[in-house]
Amino acid sequence: MVADLSDFANQEIDEQNKTGPSLKLYTAGSGNGGWAYVVEGSESESKKGSYSEDTKRGFIPQLKAVAEGTDYLNNKYSNPKVTIYTPNESIVGLINGENDPDPDYRELYRSAKKNYDENWNRWDIRHLSGGDNPARDLV
């Protein structure tokens, strides 16, 4: 029996479209340059760090948390379904393409936006006003 090449092509497309685990990415940044993210889902992961340049009152560390968290998810998981929670409404607008990035944080923006755009059909970003944010406990 000879295999039809379309069978292999369809199998590869099915693998690419298969949705991985459902995850939540919580992000936080502070005015002193601290940033953190927490991933909740199949394997919990958290990371924190600091941003040493001008923090723009915490906006840049918050964007750094989103960029680092989306990098982590993009590299660690295959096709995850992700909800990103950020306490900064402006970042939601940036990632959704509603706001233009300032040159001061363009590189961080590009990283986060690239990761988000590559996964737009499975990822969502939301403003987290108040409520429980495990990343905030790390900064």
Image: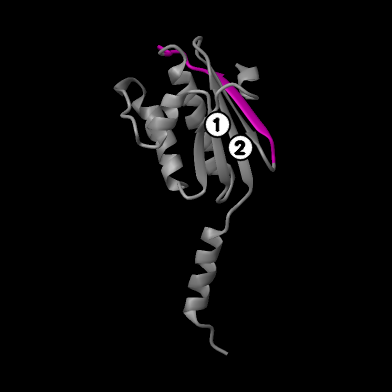
* Of the image marks 2 and 1, the number of the one nearer the N terminus: 2
**Location of residue 128 in the rendering, given as x and y in whole percent from the top left corner:** 55, 27
At label 2, which amino acid type do we have? Lys
Label 2 residue SS: strand
Cα distance between the residues tagged 2 and 1:
7 Å
Crowd around label 1: few <14 · some 14–19 · many ≥20 (10 Å): many
At label 1, which amino acid type do we have? Tyr
Residue drawn at x 51%, y 26% is: 65
Q: Quadrant of the C terminus?
A: top right
Is residue 109 covered in magenta? no
Q: Would you name the residue on which mark 1 appears?
A: 85
**Location of residue 20 in the rendering, given as x and y in whole percent from the top left corner:** 61, 52
Residue placed farthest to the right in the image? 43
Closest to the observer: 79 or 53?
A: 79
Q: Which residues are magenta?
A: 43-55
**Location of residue 41 in the rendering, given as x and y in whole percent from the top left corner:** 67, 40
Q: How is the image coloured?
A: one colour
Left or right? Give the position of 122 relative to 97.
right
Residue drawn at x 52%, y 23% is: 87
